Image: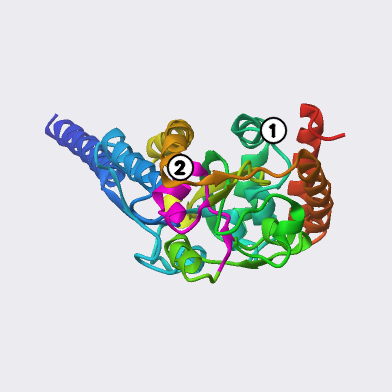
Amino acid sequence: MMRRKEGMLRVMGVIIGLCMTTSLFTFFEANAADVAQKWNVQSIFPAGESLYKEFVNFTEKVKVMTNNRLVITPHPVGAVVGYKEMFDSLKSGVLQGYYSAGAFQSGKEPAFSAFCDLPGGYDNVMQIDAWYYQKGGLKLLRDIHAKFGNYAVGTIFYGREVMPSKVPIRSLADLKGKKIRAPEGIVAKLITKLGASTVPLPGSEVFSALDKGVVDLTDWGTRSMNLNMGFYDACKYSLEPGFHSMSALEFVVSTKAWNALPKDIQGILDAATREWSWNTVTRVMKEDAEAGAKLKTLGVEITPLPESDYQKIRIIARDLWYEWGKMSPASQTVVDSQVAWLKELGLLK
């Protein structure tokens, strides 16, 4: 009888031990998931720019939504690394993420420029957003970034760009010989085809370049974005509407940083990035409307091109898409996908 009781006690001891071990594993696993992840993410925008302010708002919301389990420290352009070094800094771990334009990475993979902007393509933000989120564009972006050990969380839009200019640009002929600040990629190729030259500069250096005559006009952002950067203090003309399409910015993190997050925080980031994009779009829309009166006060003259010139630019731009597609298999896939969507929209014959 005693032996039976001793046996039962041993069995119960084993069971209790197993239960305690399982509980401890569960406890540590849960607490591991709750350990705060801390990221450093740098933007291409200066601290005073509206797009940077919306980026800061996004990081603050993520902190609240994750109950401090993910804390993103935002950095303006150049605060940690140079704007051209952000891509490589994810691999080294200096940054966990960046908020930039794919055109700056076109030297790594030409497809990144095709993701960023097809000049002469879309008419409004909704159309390019639909390509990314309804027609497979975001999956393509993620697949290509994965080859570099990165993960594209999502895209951020803002609207159609205009060009502050030190000289009046009233026709394509006026563009010839001018120096234009523009990023690398398809847009730079287009500007060269139109007879101008390009100078790639971060936003923080554009005003000085305009003021000193290093460039004659700049491709940077919308009317209000240019106003906030002080460009109209150096430029008394504004080429509007710009001959751009709708630029897409990207929020990219290292795959290592992404995989370290619990699934629920990954889901929060997906949703928060979508909200960030549309908060940016509507903020810029509001500020662009308000900027009109300020430009009048500054004596800035709006100089649109003739419609016939815009048509010529579209033809040249679309030829460039196909040339750009030939630069890599991935670039061809991205261009073909967008061309198919533009045809569905009736924007391309």
Q: Residues within 10 Å of mark 1 (few under 14, many from 20)?
A: some
First in sequence, mark 1 or 2: give its number.
Answer: 1
- Three-letter residue code for mark 2: Leu
Q: Where residue 51 appears, x then y in whole percent?
A: 42, 45
In the depicted view, which residue is nearer to us: 220 or 173? 173
Q: Is residue 91 visible?
A: no
Q: Is residue 323 above or below residue 225?
A: below
Q: Is residue 183 left or right of residue 309?
A: left
Residue corresponding to mark 1: 135
In the depicted view, which residue is nearer to us: 101 or 139? 101
Q: Is residue 301 left or right of residue 224?
A: right
In the depicted view, which residue is nearer to us: 248 or 237? 237
Q: Residues within 10 Å of mark 2 (few under 14, many from 20)?
A: many
The numbered disc on residue 295 is 2
Q: Which residues are magenta?
A: 215-236
Q: Is residue 111 above or below residue 10?
A: below
- Three-letter residue code for mark 1: Lys
Residue 291's quadrant in the figure? top left
Q: Where residue 339 appears, x then y in whole percent?
A: 79, 40
Task: Report the colour scheme.
Answer: rainbow
Residue beneath the point at 71% across and 67% down: 177
Dot 1 falls on a residue whose secondary structure is loop
Dot 2 falls on a residue whose secondary structure is helix
